Image (tube, rainbow, N blue to C red):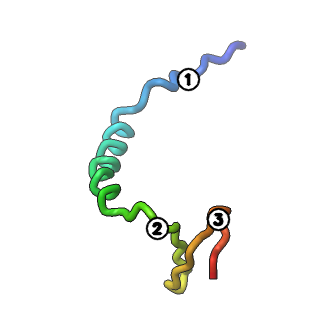
Amino acid sequence: MTEIPPPWKDIAPSVQALLTAFHQDTWIKQELAPTDSTPVYQCADGTLYEVDEDGWLIE
């Protein structure tokens, strides 16, 4: 029995609508984001730690 590969190029209309809504204000987010900031990790207790280029927390 041969398998028929799924049509990966087709995106369901509901998924396309979600992606469109999600990316609608991306340009605003990019305009507000600082370009020279380091990534930040927020712990469960609310404390914030910077993350280095390897993904480790900087305390």
User: Which residue is found at the position 34% from the left and 45% from the top?
Assistant: 18
Q: Mark 2 or 3, which is nearer the eye?
A: 2
Mark number displayed over residue 37:
2
- What kind of element bears circle 2? loop
- Name the amino acid type tagged 1: Pro
Gap between marks 2 and 3 measured at Cα:
14 Å
Q: Is residue 34 left or right of residue 51?
A: left
The residue tagged with tag 1: helix, strand or loop? loop
Mark 3 touches mark 1? (CB < 8 Å): no
Residue 55: which numbered mark, if any?
A: 3
Looking at the image, is mark 1 or mark 2 nearer the viewer?
A: 2
Which percent across, then down, holds residue 38?
A: 51, 68
The residue wearing badge 1 is 6
Q: CA distance from mark 1 to mark 2?
A: 41 Å
Q: Residue at x 38, y 39 (%)?
A: 15
Pointer 2 or 3: first along the chain: 2
Whether pointer 1 and pointer 2 mark residues with C-beta atoms closer than 8 Å, the reply is no
Q: Which mark is residue 57?
A: none
Q: Quadrant of residue 57?
A: bottom right
Q: Mark 3 Cα within 10 Å, few/some/many (few <14, many 20+)?
A: few
Q: Which element carries disc 3, helix, strand or loop?
A: loop
Question: Upstream in the sequence, badge 1 or badge 2?
Answer: 1
Crowd tier of the residue under label 2, counting other residues whose Cα lies within 10 Å: few below 14, some 14–19, many 20 or above: few
Q: Amino acid at mark 2?
A: Ser
